[in-house]
Each structure stands twice: as C-alpha cells, then as structure tokens.
Amino acid sequence: MNSINKTARLAGTLYLLLLPLGILGLILVQTNLIVQGDAAATASNILASESLFRVSIVSALMVQVVNIFVVLTLYQVLKPVNKNMASLMVIFILLGAPIAMLSEASRFAVLPLLSNTEYLAVFTPEQLQALAYFFLDLHENGIQVASIFWGLWLFPMGYLVYKSGFLPKILGILLIIGCFGYLADFFIVALFPALNVTVSQFTFIGEIALPLWLVIKGVNVEQWNKLASASA
C-alpha cells in the first residue's frame, strides 16, 4: 500500500523540480540577457553574466535528465490503466529529450564566439556578435521542435489520469489541454511568427496540479490495486 504512494510522491517531487530548473534553464536568460533584434546588446549582456549563462545551459540539460526519471516513475504509477498508452507517454519524452539536449550545443557555441578566441580573429567583433545571435536563434528553434514532444506526452498521460479512477479526472482534462497549448505554440512560431503569442503560458496548470496532488494526496491505493491486479 505504501509502495505505490511512495512512487507517486517521488514522481510528483521530481515533476515539481522541473519548475525551478526550467525557469533557470529556459526563461531567465531569454528574458534578462537576450535583447530581441540587437546582437551587440545581447553579446554584452552574456559577457557580463557569463556564469548565469553557463548555469542556465547546465540547468536546461538537467531538465531533460530529470524529465526522463519523471516519465519512468509516472509509468510505474499509470501502467495499470493502459500499458500501451503509458509506453507512448515514455516514448514521446525519450524523443523530445535528445532534441532539447542537442539544442544546448548551440548555446555552448555562443561563448567562444564572444570570448576573443584566437582562431576567430579573422572575423570582426560585429560578425562574431551576429553569429552568436544566430546560434541563440538556432537554440530557440530547437526548443520549439522539442516542445512538440513536450506537448504530445501530456495527451497519453492526461488520458491515463482521466481513466485511472485513482486520480481526479479534472487533472487528466487539464493535462490534455496542456498538450494542445504546447502544440499551438509550435505551429504559431512555425507558421505565424509575427503573432508573438505563447499559448502554453495559459494551459500549463495541469503540470502543476498533478505533481502537487501526487505529493500531497498520492493515489487511491484501493483503486490502483484493483487495476494492477486486473492487468497482471
């Protein structure tokens, strides 16, 4: 009885850990260091806060590592509902993680471009700043591609939560809404970049509500045991 709730609370705790890691890795640099359309100002900000820039890269990589543990732990909680859907949830995260991690290579490339590296002396400072800004744009595009899978994994997870009987149905509905928020963000950026709208900032509630529920309440153990016995 205690075992599954320990697993559920571990999943919730790891899921909540993604919030500070994500803010540090994916948001702080974007909002505080990058000046839209101004390569010189962006370069100056990064050089003035190089430690923050480096920490944000490490944090963004940690997001993906932790996310893999999150989905594997959630798989143990949700697989009695439907193993195929639980496996699909895992597959989507395992597809998105390497894309997001490889995207961080673009940010690593920014630092030597701005650090007076000897073999880059053939370029002018303005050219190097422009190249650095290009790599930052490339990173953002990679994150947008990864966000497809950050959205898609929420659909099978939301379905499993909704059908489970050992977690509130509303959590499943909120997760599915979150799925379409991420997908909307991708299509807006890809097809209508001038709109400058981020839908997921309004549809992420399920990703906060579920881990909080898991940490505070856990699952209905009796219902979970019934499903686990039926699927054994």
Image: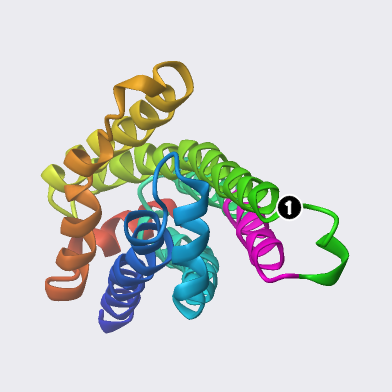
Picture quadrant where residue 97 is located? bottom right
Q: Is residue 55 left or right of residue 218?
A: right
Query: Compared to 216, does 100 lie above or below?
Result: above
Query: Compared to 181, does 113 lie above or below?
Result: below
Amino acid type assigned to the residue bearing label 1 in the image? Thr
- The residue closer to the viewer here, 68 or 164, is 68
User: Which residue is labeled 1 in the image?
Assistant: 124
Query: Compared to 75, does 50 lie above or below?
Result: below
Asked if residue 110 is among those painted magenta in the image, a careful observer would answer: yes
Q: Give percent across and percent down for residue 179.
A: 33, 36
| Point 32% across, 55% down: residue | 31
Figure coloring: rainbow
Q: Give percent across and percent down for residue 68.
A: 52, 63
- The residue closer to the viewer here, 85 or 50, is 50
| Point 14% across, 44% down: residue | 169
Q: Give percent across and percent down for residue 140.
A: 51, 44
Q: Give percent across and percent down for residue 151.
A: 40, 39
| Point 44% across, 45% down: residue | 150
Asked if residue 52 is among those painted magenta in the image, a careful observer would answer: no
Picture quadrant where residue 209 is located? bottom left
| Point 85% across, 55% down: residue | 122
Q: Main secondary structure of the magenta part?
A: helix
- The residue closer to the viewer here, 46 or 223, is 46
Residue neighbourhood size for the residue with mark 1, other residues' Cα within 10 Å, grouped as few (<14), some (14–19), many (≥20):
few
* Mark 1 residue element: loop
Picture quadrant where residue 58 is located? bottom right
Q: Farthest residue to the top: give it.
A: 191
The residue stretch that appears in magenta: 99-116
Q: Is residue 157 left or right of residue 85?
A: left
